[in-house]
Image (tube, rainbow, N blue to C red):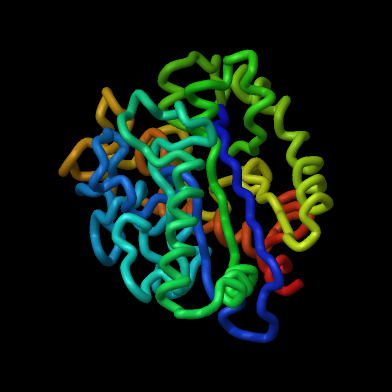
Amino acid sequence: MTSLSIFLSLAMKPIHGQQQQVPCLFFLGDSQFDNGNNNLLLTSAKANYPPYGIDYADGATGRFSNGRNIADYLGFEKPVPPFATARGSDIIKGVNYASGGAGILEESGIQLGDRISLDRQLLNHRLTITRLLLLLSKQSSSVYDYLTKCLYAVNMGSNDYINNYLMPHFTQLVVYTHQTGLPQELAMYPTNGSPCVDFINNDVELFNDRLKSLIDSLNTDLPNAQFIYINITSISSGDPSVIGIRVVNAPCCVVSRRTGQCAPNQVPCSNRNEYAFWDNFHPTEILNHVTASRAYNATEPTDAYPVDIRRLVQQ
C-alpha cells in the first residue's frame, strides 16, 4: 500500500556561491520531520524513549526513527532546534516546527492526543519572527529580507490521509504525494500476495496529478517565491535491494499492537540497514537518507518538479 505526505519546498532569493547555500532553514510537518516538539505534549505520538534513537548520537530525542530523519539530512551539520526548546540565538539558523500526528486539517490526529497542526505551526513561525526582530535588533524590513533567503520545507499530509481520506469533502482540502507502504496498513487489509494494499493506492493516485498544477499556480500567483514539490512515489519506486534494503513489509523494532510504534525498551533488529521501516509507520535512517538525498539531488526526472532542492537554492 502507499501512504501520503506533502513534501513542498519554498525558497526566495537564495544565496549564491556559498558552501552554506541558505542562511536558515524552517521545517513544518509531522512525525517524518519532528525532532522533539511532541516530547512534552499529552499524546501517544512520542518517540523520546528507547529504542527510538538507537543509532542517533544523542539517543531518543523525539525523532521517529532509529537515527536521523529526513529534516536532519536536509539541514546543516548541526540540526536546527525544535520550536519547543529553541532559545536565544538558536533560532537564527532556523527552527523545526514539525509535530508527530499533525495534519493539514486541524482535526487530523486528534485520537492520538495533542499535536501541533499546520495552522499552529504557522503561528509558531510568527512567534519566531517576533523573536528574531528582538534578537537581531533590526528594522522589520531587514529581518524579512533575511527570511526571504531561507529554505522552507513542508512534509505533511499522511495523518490527513490516514484519518480522513474516505471523507467525501476531503478531495477539496488536501493535495499530496505518497510514499512506500506502511506495515500497519498491510496488517489491516488483505493484499492477496501483493506488497501493497492496492485499493488504497488506487484511491490516492487520484490526487497525485494535482500537484504539478498546484505548484504552477503557486509560482504564478506568488512570483517573489519559488515552490517545488518532491515526488516521494518516484523516490520510493524501484528495487530497494539496490541500496541494501531487503525487508519492506515489516518493522525493525518490536511494535505496540495498540499504537503501531516501537514498544518501550525492547531490542530491535540488528540489521537495521536492511529494513525500510523502523516501526509500523516510520522509515529507518537509511531510507530517510535516500529520500533526502534524492530530494536534494534528483536521480530521476520524476523525483522533483519543476526542479530539485539543489537547483532551487541555486536560482
Horizontal relation, residue 280 to residue 42: left or right: right
Horizontal relation, residue 173 to residue 314: left or right: left
The quarter of the picture where residue 292 lies is bottom right
Query: x%, y% of residue 89?
Result: 37, 76
The quarter of the picture where residue 262 lies is top left
**Is residue 108 visible to the viewer in this orientation of the structure?**
yes
- Which quadrant of the figure contains the C terminus? bottom right
Query: x%, y% of residue 43?
Result: 27, 35
Q: Which of the pair 180/81 is nearer the observer?
A: 81
Residue shown at the point (45%, 26%) measured from the top left: 107
Q: Tag count in the figure? A: 0
**Is residue 276 visible to the viewer in this orientation of the structure?**
no
Query: x%, y% of residue 88?
Result: 33, 72
Q: Residue reaching furthest left?
A: 265
The quarter of the picture where residue 58 lies is bottom left
Query: x%, y% of residue 271?
Result: 34, 51
Residue shown at the point (63%, 50%) measured from the top left: 8
- Which quadrant of the figure contains the N terminus? top right
Task: Classify 237 as above or below 110.
Answer: below
Horizontal relation, residue 187 to residue 237: left or right: left
Task: Classify 256 as above or below 96.
Answer: above
Residue shown at the point (45%, 80%) measured from the top left: 137
